[in-house]
Amino acid sequence: MTAVVLFVVSAVLWQEQFIDGVSSMNQLYDYTVDIAHEGETVVLRAYPQAQGFASAWFFIDYQNPFPDDAILRLTMKVTENRARLRFFCLRHGHSVYYAGETNIAANEHWQNVDILLQDAQPFYSSNFPASLTPGNEPVLFLFIENEEPSAFHVEIDDISVIEQMEEK
């Protein structure tokens, strides 16, 4: 009998730890979201009334599209409402963005949320999300929103894109 040991090694392709501020995080259009840098985290607070929803977004301006098997990892805490994470990413050899989303339940504890970029589906649009960054074509956009039309509170400690490589 031969024993096989499998090691999984991860390489960090991109990372934002919010040490110096909120980076390029913005509120989407007329949605009102308070974006604050507290310690080494970004805190998103929203109390939407007329609109019902709030959306903050940022982009990753990386040199090339990430590998299809890359993982978008967020270390976050959602303390009010449920958060909806929508992402749009470019893929090698494709001219359209690919889109995906996941919902995160409220939890008072920090959690790691892993999103597989390969689960994204083609998103055909003439100008969204690229219209948010005129003259620039970021490889990934991330939108953090409230899932239900009420207040929400999200804290983000770290966002990274990693690639897992298996070794025997």
Image (cartoon, helix red, strand yellow):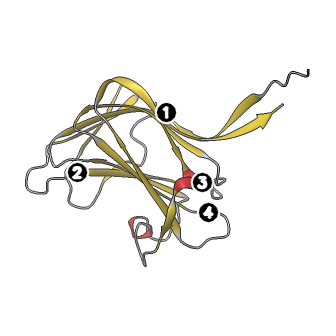
Point 39% across, 24% down: residue: 110
Mark 1 or 2, which is nearer the eye?
A: 2
Residue at the disc numbered 2:
54
Between disc 3 and disc 4, whose residue precedes? 3
Report the quarter where the C terminus lies. top right
Alpha-carbon span between mark 4 and mark 2: 28 Å
**Seen from this angle, which residue lies furthest left?**
50
Q: Give the answer, above or below, for where 43 lies relative to 87.
A: above
Q: At numbered mark 3, what does the secondary structure look like: helix, strand or loop?
A: loop
Between disc 1 and disc 3, whose residue precedes? 1
Between disc 1 and disc 2, whose residue precedes? 1
Amino acid type at circle 2 is Ala
User: Where is residue 86 drawn, in percent x and y?
Assistant: 39, 53
> Is residue 61 shown to the viewer in this render?
no
Between disc 4 and disc 1, whose residue precedes? 1
User: Where is residue 125 drawn, in percent x and y?
Assistant: 42, 75
Q: Give the answer, above or below, for where 128 lies relative to 77.
A: below
Point 53% across, 66% down: residue: 137
Alpha-carbon span between mark 1 and mark 2: 23 Å
Amino acid type at circle 4 is Arg
Q: At numbered mark 4, what does the secondary structure look like: helix, strand or loop?
A: loop
Residue at the disc numbered 3:
62
- Circles 1 and 2 in contact, beta carbons < 8 Å: no
- Circles 4 and 2 in contact, beta carbons < 8 Å: no
Residue at the disc numbered 1:
17
**Seen from this angle, which residue lies furthest right?**
1
Q: At numbered mark 1, what does the secondary structure look like: helix, strand or loop?
A: loop
Amino acid type at circle 1 is Gln
Residue at the disc numbered 4:
91
Q: At numbered mark 2, what does the secondary structure look like: helix, strand or loop?
A: loop
